[in-house]
Image (cartoon, helix red, strand yellow):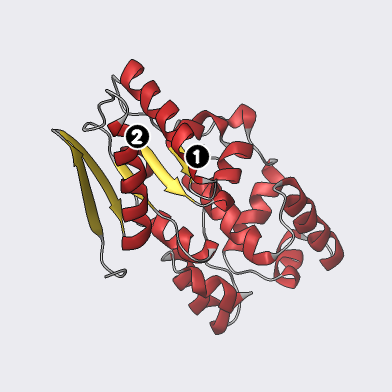
Amino acid sequence: MTNKKLRLKGSIMNNQIHIDGENYFITLAITKVMDDILKNSQLNISHLKMAAVVDATPFLELQRFQKLSLDVYDLIFCSEYFYNIVCEFSPENINKFVCVDNDIASLRNNLESLIKGFNRNYSTRPYFPDGDREKSLFTPCELSFINDYFSCMRAKQIARVTGNNVKSVSNKKRNIMNKIHCTKNSDFYITLYFLNMLHKVELELHEPITNVRSTVAWKRVSGQETGAFQYAH
């Protein structure tokens, strides 16, 4: 059941709840909270399009995010891991995301506040604005490095192509990781990929001039297979 996309519906009278999700139990729990909110209010949520992407690990949750067209959803239920990324780097979209890792009282209060906001101001669905170059998170040099890194180039390869030494390349990666508060390669990949989905960084993958092993991995990464990135790095 968890491998198939499902849509759970709840209802209070004629007020329908529609939540898209692949994890039945999490989606059911969120629907129950929404039901409880509606019992004590006159809020209308039948017009809201919602999705639950929560999963056991950030990698699995990222894969669920990759299946969504984020701009078509009004509310996206996610873990604290991704919610914190939005808070830090994309605050203009914070009202689109709901953290399910809060205690139940906080979750209910946050949801009720968000839904009230939608009922007051609902005219068009919130959207993800195009990236603002003046407010870019990264310098052009850092963006170039990020695209080389995401194209499965190792430090030695990036150093050779850019004319730098391996130490300077490693320092540049460390500085970028510090900027987005990452201490592990896995977090570095997940955070940057999610920032790309939020239009905060533009990934322009290119096939590296390297051996066959990395070329195969690049094809997998360019096809959005997250496991291939671990294989290549």
Q: Residue furthest front?
A: 40
Location of residue 49 in the rendering, given as x and y in whole percent from the top left corner: 28, 39
* Residue 87 visible here: yes
Viewer can see residue 73: no
In the image, is 90 to the left or to the right of 13?
A: right
Local crowd at mark 1 within 10 Å, few (<14), some, or many (≥20)? Answer: few
Residue type of the residue flagged with mark 2:
Ile
Image point 63% across, 27% down: which residue?
134
Circle 1: residue type: Ala
Whether pointer 1 and pointer 2 mark residues with C-beta atoms closer than 8 Å, the reply is no
Q: Quadrant of the C terminus?
A: bottom right
**Residue at x 29%, y 40% (from the top left corner):** 35
Closer to the camera, 88 or 203? Answer: 88
Query: Quick check: 167 left or right of 36?
Result: right
Element on which disc 1 rests:
helix
Q: In whole angstroms, how far apart are the C-alphas of marks 1 and 2?
A: 11 Å
Q: Is residue 105 above or below residue 217?
A: above
Q: Residue furthest top?
A: 120
Residue holding disc 1: 105
Callout 2 environment at 10 Å: few (<14), some (14 to 19), or many (20+)?
Answer: some
Tell me: 109 left or right of 214: left
Coordinates of residue 29 in the picture (x, y in percent): 36, 53
Number of marks in the image? Answer: 2
Task: Choose the circle earlier in sequence order: 1 or 2.
Answer: 2
Q: Which residue is mark 2?
A: 37
**Which SS class for mark 2?**
helix
Residue farthest along the left direction in this orientation: 14
Q: Where residue 100 sits: x, y (%)?
A: 48, 48
